[in-house]
Image: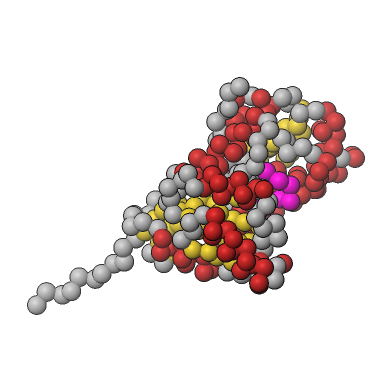
Amino acid sequence: MQPEESQTPQTRCGFVALIGAPNAGKSTLLNSLVGAKVSIVSRKVQTTRQLVCGIVIEGASQIIFVDTPGIFQPKRRLDRAMVTTAWGGAGDADVIGLLVDSRKGLDESADALLARLGEIRRPKILILNKIDVLQRDKLLALAAGLNERAEFAHTFMISALTGDGVDDLRRSLAGMMPESPWLYPEDQITDAPLRMLAAEITREKMFERLHDELPYQSTVETDSWEERPDGSVRIEQTVFVERESQRKIVLGEKGQTIKAIGQAARRDIAEAAETPVHLFLHVKVRENWSEDPARYREMGLDFPRG
């Protein structure tokens, strides 16, 4: 008698694009789903600039979440590049998750997103975020109103900040993934190179420290990443701003601001890299960097012509 062959579960794998208006909470949700920082979080709008992937294992499913830049009405070249990237990420996904800030409800930004979503032939889910700040009857009314505007396969009510409802969201999405081999190793949580993630972490700390004092066009580049014999890493980064007045803001009096930014960034980079980090920051003026095609390529964005 032949022994029965062991039945291995069919693996699933797919992409979920998280889209929404700036500050809807996409980056916070992505980090909560993954269980680690893979995308920067800031109160400053439009901090996410490129597609950042967070990779999650749920049962036999590998879910690749794509945190897209916030979708808004573009005014500058950089704005147009970010919005184009966001919609491109949505069109390529297996499932689109529309994240709506419950406090803002069906405002102008959500209305514009719903109008555009109808053009994309992909399964869609509605994710109402920040539910801890709204009464249940108002949440249910908001969910009903949004479902009248677009065809959503499921509606989830969550708090990305506290984690409420996030496990249910993850499990449901695992079942929506197509049958496929996994695309990444089981222990990989992001497709972002550490050099890029380190630069994004420093940019996050810069915005946290300076808030509205610094335009969001400021950027950070990792110049060198040197692994030392003792297992630590020596990192040099440059903060680029567009004017000398902005450089003085980032440096602060007697260099205290850049020192504080560096200390905060070093802690998070060390956690992401799982090794001690020695971080050295420089601040330089690069006029009109947001008009330089090379900078867009480094950020993974297409350079909009005209």
Q: Quadrant of the N terminus?
A: bottom left
- Magenta-colored stretch includes residue 41: yes
**Quarter of image, res 29:** bottom right
**What residue span does the magenta drawing correspond to?**
40-46
* Residue under the image location 62 percent in, 29 percent down: 295
**Front one among 138 and 296:** 138
Q: Position of residue 121 (x, y in %)?
A: 42, 47
**Quarter of image, res 215:** top right
Q: Position of residue 168 (x, y in %)?
A: 52, 69
* Residue under the image location 67 percent in, 43 percent down: 46
* Left or right of 297, for residue 208: right
* Residue 134 drawn above or below residue 84: below
Which residue is farthest right?
A: 253
Which residue is farthest top?
A: 306
The scheme the figure's colours follow is: secondary structure
* Residue 157 drawn above or below residue 243: below
Q: How many marks?
A: 0
**Front one among 133 and 302:** 133
Any part of residue 253 in sight: yes
Q: Position of residue 175 (x, y in %)?
A: 40, 64
* Residue under the image location 33 percent in, 57 percent down: 179
**Front one among 45 and 233:** 45
Any part of residue 269 in sight: no
* Left or right of 183, for residue 54: right
Q: Quadrant of the C terminus?
A: top right
Q: Position of residue 70 (x, y in %)?
A: 63, 45
**Front one among 72 and 292:** 72
Q: Main secondary structure of the magenta part?
A: loop
* Residue 71 drawn above or below residue 167: above
* Left or right of 217, for residue 303: left
Which residue is farthest bottom?
A: 1
- Magenta-colored stretch includes residue 107: no
